[in-house]
Amino acid sequence: MSHCESLFPRRRTRTVRVASVLIGSDHPVSVQSMITAPAENVEAAVAQIVRLADAGAQLVRLAVPTPAAAKALRAVCDRSPVPLVADIHFNARLALAAMEAGAAKIRINPGNIPVADDLYRVIDEAGRRGTAIRIGVNSGSVMPRDRDDARQHAPQEIARRMVDAARSYLDLFERRSFRDIVLSLKGSDVPTTVWAYRHMAEACDYPLHLGITAAGPREEAVLKSAAGLGALLAEGLGDTLRISITGDPVNEVHVGRRLLEVMGLAPLAGVEIISCPTCGRCEVDLTSLAEKLYEATRSIRKPLRVAVMGCVVNGPGEAREADLGVAAGRGFGVFFRHGQTTGEKIPQDQLFERTFDEIRRLTAS
């Protein structure tokens, strides 16, 4: 048993196959995202999928809101480096078209796809093809339509409605002998989301797709996701996740991957920048140095721990523990490579270039 498994033992689930990706407790927690380009713009859609895959996404979802999008999906699937998930709302027939086009997984929302013959056909066709389905419940789809009435509902009441909706749909799928199912119950706040996932986890052994819906711009989304998804992951819940962030979806993959890494649920797969918060002892512009290094190294996929420290109190110790460290003095910095100081004093105006060059050298092999 690995260190991360002993700290956060996973809830036991069945395994669901999504093309080459296996989702469940016997497999690593996977990271997903969703493109913003329409499927009809095949070039833009494929380009965005490739960027997400390069950033570390193992699954990518895209909206299929129209027959035209479903028709274009085939060309996108043919060129995608990762399995694609078709996001279906309102019209179950689009799920049939998406499967025909090559989608490896279908996401449907009980809140807007009614139980009817078309849904039965989707379930049966997915079973015939071996296509997985995510039953994805969002808090907004179970809230009362009246705004004042909705505001009166506590997070637990909203979460209970989400669980009830998911279980009702789940019963329908199981009655048709379909079990290649992943479940998600996303609220727009942490308490609702955590409560819903906890209670759903007690009721079944299906894999859970974690997320907080409409989380907001980057800082707000990262805070909500770290609090909510971090709490669930620490309880052993969650088999795949998406960090919803307004803006460039590549940010979702970076944050999702790092969340798993910092919790010990995935090996370090890039450059980790460690830096002190600075204080009155710091005599270099450490903030600028750390931020520039962070941005410059985001695309590097080889593991490296880099400590950037601002003074002699914690600097040498932290720098020695990293693969590469910089301990700053008055207007200069000293390098540590794998715990050993080089003894060279590097002027502040050269610190970024010299440190980045060293990072590239250490990650080149």
Image: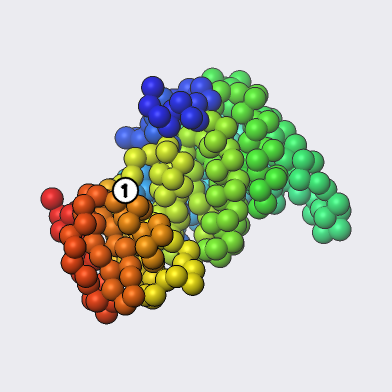
For the residue labelled by badge 1, is the local secondary structure a helix, a strand or a loop? helix
Side of 243 relative to 196 (left or right): left
Please state which of residues 211 and 181 is positioned toward the viewer in this rendering.
211
Residue 35 x, y percent position in the rendering: 43, 58
Q: Tell me the quarter of the picture where residue 345 sits.
A: bottom left
Identify which amino acid the numbered label 1 is placed on: Glu
Q: Which residue position is annotated with label 1?
A: 321
Q: Quadrant of the N terminus?
A: top left
Say which of 197 and 101 sits in front: 197
Where residue 177 sits in the image (x, y, percent)? 54, 20
* Residue sitting farthest toward the left: 365
Image position of 149 (left or right of 123): right
Q: In which image quadrant can residue 103 be found?
A: top left
The picture places residue 263, in percent across and down from the top left corner, at 46, 41
Residue 188 in view, yes or no: yes
- Picture residue at 32% right of the left edge, 56% below the top: 316
Q: Position of residue 52 (x, y in %)?
A: 35, 55
Residue 97: tell me if it is visible. no
How many numbered discs, if any?
Answer: 1
Query: Looking at the rendering, which quadrant does residue 38 occupy?
Result: bottom left
Q: In this image, 126 relative to 55: left or right?
A: right
Q: Residues within 10 Å of mark 1 (few under 14, many from 20)?
A: some
Render colour scheme: rainbow
